[in-house]
Amino acid sequence: MLMLLLVENSEGVISASNYLVGLGSYDITGPAADINMMGFAKMYQTTSGIHSRLRARTFIVAEPQGKRVVFVNIDACMASQIVTIKVLERLKARYGNLYTKDNVAITATHTHAGPGGYLQYFVYIVTSFGFVRQSFDALVDGIEQSIIQAHDNLRPGSIYVNKAELLDAGVNRSPSAYLNNPAEERSRYKYDVDKDMTLLKFVDDKWGPVGSFNWFATHGTSMSRTNRLISGDNKGAAARFMEDWFDQDSSVRKPSDAFKAKENPPRVSNIIPFVHENHCEFQELNASSQSSSSKPATRFMSLARRVRSAVRQVDRPAFVSAFCQNNGGDVSPNLLGPFCIDTGSPCDFNHSTCGGKNALCFGRGPGPDEFESTRIIGDRQFKKAVELFNTASEQLKGKVDYRHTYVDFSKLEVTISKQGGGNKVVKTCPAAMGFSFAAGTTDGPGSFDFKQGDVKGNAFWRWLFSLLKKPNQEQVNCQHPKPILLNTGEVKQPYDWSPAILPVQILRIGQLVILSVPGEVTTMAGRRLRDAVQTVLTTEASKEFDGNFHVVIAGLTNAYSQYVTTFEEYQIQRYEVSD
């Protein structure tokens, strides 16, 4: 229905080529000592220093006399509904009704190495022993300031979109669940994870390129559960690489200095990627990046632009590059796959265990340690982004629009197909966590005797956690085949344990559609979502969308509600469907 509303209320496509474009960036690092990290849910994992600082990166796109949208990407585990609400309150006080819940999206990279305690639901702040004001304030302040910067930087500009495959930055960490999807559906795709990176290139009419945002699916878990240094993980590293690359290339430094390696302390990898072997390639890419028309520029044009801009370079807005999350719910950056740390053998395929124990099964990254793995995965995303940035030629043209609504997912009626034909109406129920949730993932295994793929549960744990809130038979039947460990949706003391009413949002910039989803979407679930949106927009609004448009999923946006999977994946009860 939300898609139909977007279509039915759309007007004709504008013919003007450009928009008002503004970008901003601000620090959101937060407390670097003694605060529980958000992501792995380990009480012992507290902040104890900084590997890389965290930032909020924002773009605003507006029609000169029309609507506008705000998109913020934060180096954090997920967006928080209470953070979003507070940011919107501050924006209202400053700008009135210019920026509201309808046209502002706040998404996250999903790093598991940032300070926690900034969400309002009990289950998400139990490991931080409650709400952490310092974490919350750092996020709210930084997001607000990044939006203010973007607003102040609004100037006439153009946007270009590009897309290509990145093959070596993510693998499916729950392949047994993916394989339970229909064979006919799987045969339509070459890989069991999405390999596409979609990038926007922002070009200021005066200054030329001023930033880029891209969407690519891979988890922010290159840094492990034993790490205690605040880090933007692989996407934070990629953003730093790209911003440094552009700044260094736009300066008067010798080209050979751009990617020069530096000495580093033991075990801490260089934050600048080792790409010195590709000097010529990147110098050529560099030259084309200076063309405001998004077409390759000559060496003379590049030199002339540098000379012209040198006098007032101080006025140039800082280049902002964001690496956003996509449908990466089941995608791991630990490319070598899961192995048993005691034997070195591959883990059990279905349960990710070693001799029946999940705690010994870990995914291995491409580097010798977590710092190097973070650099490598970040470097690969960075290089692909540079390639897309410098070859982007498809210009976004058309209206800016948005839709937003709240949905109570605890009592939603849905019409589905029945086996053998026909349809039936089913109803959702309050949230619950299964036994596989406690098993963790190969990126960060859980404790005790839990394991992924558990459809039976354990009598002792079932009895123990039922003391909090025993699920009734209706809830048990609704959640089947998930055996309920924590009946979170029905626990209200000391306050709600998990969300029920969640924001759903769509942003449109010309032929780009951004789907703001308040959770982690698995590979196949994301493909189905994109297909459904494309079907609606091409059949119901063919006058505006003729098939030549792009749909990206911004997972972890505006709020958080854990995972979105397919019905078939749900039957296998891996971590993603039990969380």
Image: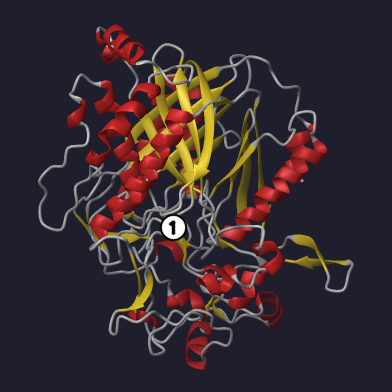
State which quadrant residue 301 falls in. top left
Residue at image location 37% in from the left, 53% down from the top: 111
Q: Nearer the viewer, residue 339 or 478?
A: 339
Vertical relation: 388 (above or below) 127: above
Whether residue 320 sits left or right of residue 521 in the image: it is left
The amino acid sitting under disc 1 is Gly
Badge 1 marks a residue whose secondary structure is loop
Residue at the right extreme of this rendering: 422
- Where's residue 390, x and y in %? 43, 29
Q: Which of 110 and 427 is in front in this view?
A: 110
Label 1 Cα crowd, 10 Å radius (few <14 / some 14-19 / many 20+):
many
Q: Which of 129 and 229 is in front in this view?
A: 229
Residue 145: tell me if it is visible: no
Vertical relation: 160 (above or below) 437: above
- Where's residue 247, x and y in %? 27, 27
Determine which residue is flagged by label 1. Answer: 170
Residue at image location 27% in from the left, 13% down from the top: 313
- Where's residue 330, x and y in %? 50, 63
Vertical relation: 10 (above or below) 77: above
Vertical relation: 71 (above or below) 217: above
- Where's residue 234, x and y in %? 34, 51
Whether residue 68 sits left or right of residue 378 in the image: it is right
